[in-house]
Amino acid sequence: MSMQRMPKAKLLPKKKRAKPAKCVPLLSTCIDSQRRKQLINLIASLESEMTDQLKNHKIFLEDIAKIEKERNLYYGILRQIEEICTSTLEETPAKKEIMDILAEEPEDFKCVAQKK
């Protein structure tokens, strides 16, 4: 086999590309920088808001615990009064009135009990 040289292919001239203006990269960097700063500020704002909401939630839970403790205290007192009233055999108008009050069910509680 003899080596023959192939004729040189004609190269097409390179297409000239338009060079981007020098300010375009600077502008995009500037926009990226501004966007980055906006995002950082937004994240900081959201973190601050979340921290505030967590503090409020903690205070809310503490308030609930205090209210439950107070509710249990008054419930205990009412139970003691009821026990005193039921332990005495003497039927007095005051005893009857107290027992009626203890047995009474508030209107708004009746609605809640019916929904369940």
Image (cartoon, rainbow, N blue to C red):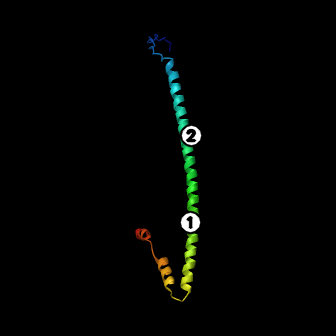
Q: How many marks?
A: 2
Q: Give me the residue at 57% from left, 59% from top.
A: 63
Q: Give me the residue at 58% from left, 70% from top.
A: 73
Residue 33 drawn at (x, y percent): 54, 29
Mark 1 residue element = helix
Mark seen at residue 44: 2
- Foreground of the two, 23 or 60: 60
Q: Residues within 10 Å of mark 1 (few under 14, many from 20)?
A: few
Residue 21, relative to residue 30: is it above or below?
above
Q: Give me the residue at 55% from left, 54% from top.
A: 57
Horizontal side, residue 14 vs residue 49: left or right? left
Horizontal side, residue 61 vs residue 110: left or right? right
Horizontal side, residue 22 vs residue 110: left or right? right
Quarter of the figure with residue 107: bottom left
- Foreground of the two, 22 or 110: 110
Mark seen at residue 2: none
Residue 20, relative to residue 64: is it above or below?
above
Residue 32 drawn at (x, y percent): 52, 29
Residue 104 drawn at (x, y percent): 46, 76
Circle 1: residue type: Glu
Q: Which residue matches tag 1?
A: 68
Pick whichever of labels 1 and 2 is earlier in the sequence.
2
- Foreground of the two, 57 or 9: 57
* Mark 1 vs 2: CB contact within 8 A: no
> In the image, which is nearer the foreground, mark 1 or mark 2?
1
Residue 80 drawn at (x, y percent): 58, 78
